[in-house]
Image (spheres, grey):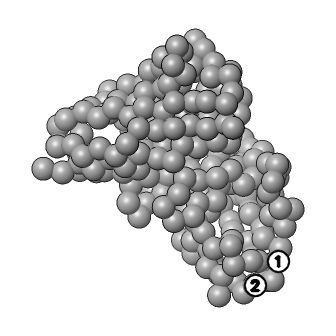
Amino acid sequence: QVQLVQSGAEVKKPGASVEVSCKASGYTFTSYYIHWVRQAPGHGLEWMGIIDPRGGTISYGQKLQGRLTMSRDTSTSTVYMELSSLRSEDSAVYYCARDTGSGSYILDVWGKGTAVAVSS
Amino acid sequence: QSALTQPPSASGTPGQRVTISCSGSASNIGSYTVNWYKQLPGTAPKLLIYSNNQRPSGVPDRFSGSKSGTSASLAFSGLQSEDEADYYCASWDDSLNGPVFGGGTKLTVL
């Protein structure tokens, strides 16, 4: 079945970087864009950015631009999200989600989420 | 503070009709379609309504969505206990050059 499997929880110190992976299966990886969305504890959803697995085109949200890097590996059907210069306010659950089209922003399949805790 | 405004909470009794509103502006809802997501505690969001009023396969028809001007609504006809969850609206936003989510509404079934 169609699914997105994310890497496990992380604990990082302020100033460090974290990389979260999202492995797609059950569909043609290069046919659907992937979004990253995060959710701080007790808060709502925040869009981070989008990547086109076919061509590698990326668009980052304004808030995290400069600290956020997304990439993909078509050989393993995996997308990656790296956030640098971590701060306590980056503590959140990070989700990858499949776009139904080429940037339709309709997110029809979600990973289970990866919890990232930033603490000294 | 999100560009899309939702009431923080809503409630109803089983069988009741309940609606959740989502208010935006010309740069988002006024120009683009709206999607709705349901999130149970500790789980990932799930697509509930897309393109204002379309239901993905498997979503019961007692859920419906609508849009008018710069606002949208999610309606439950015949509330059920399993509807208790957080609900988020989302739309594209020209200012952000990306999708924006509402702050979420916690629905309680009394």
Q: Quadrant of residue A71?
A: top left
Quarter that holds the N terminus of chain B: bottom left
The image position of residue B93, as x and y in percent, is 59, 40
Q: How many marks?
A: 2
Identify the residue shown where x is 68% and y is 73%. Answer: B82
The mark that comes first in sequence, 2 or 1, is 2
| Residue located 60% across and 69% down the image | B85
As drawn, the label of residue B23 is none
**Residue A107 position by quadrant:** top right
Instruction: Give the residue drawn at x 60%, y 14%.
Output: A54
Residue A79, position as x, y percentages in the image: 48, 26
Secondary structure category for the residue under label 1:
loop
x, y percentage for residue B84? 63, 73
Look at mark 1 in the image and give the residue it sits on. B78
- Give the spatial CA distance, label 2 vs label 1: 7 Å
Q: Considering depth in this image, is A117 or A69 the residue closer to the camera?
A: A117
Q: Amino acid at mark 1?
A: Gly
Q: Residues within 10 Å of mark 2 (few under 14, many from 20)?
A: some
Q: Is B17 located above or below residue B44 in the figure? A: below
Identity of the residue drawn at 57% across and 71% down: B106
Res B14 label: 2
* Subunit bearing disc 2: B
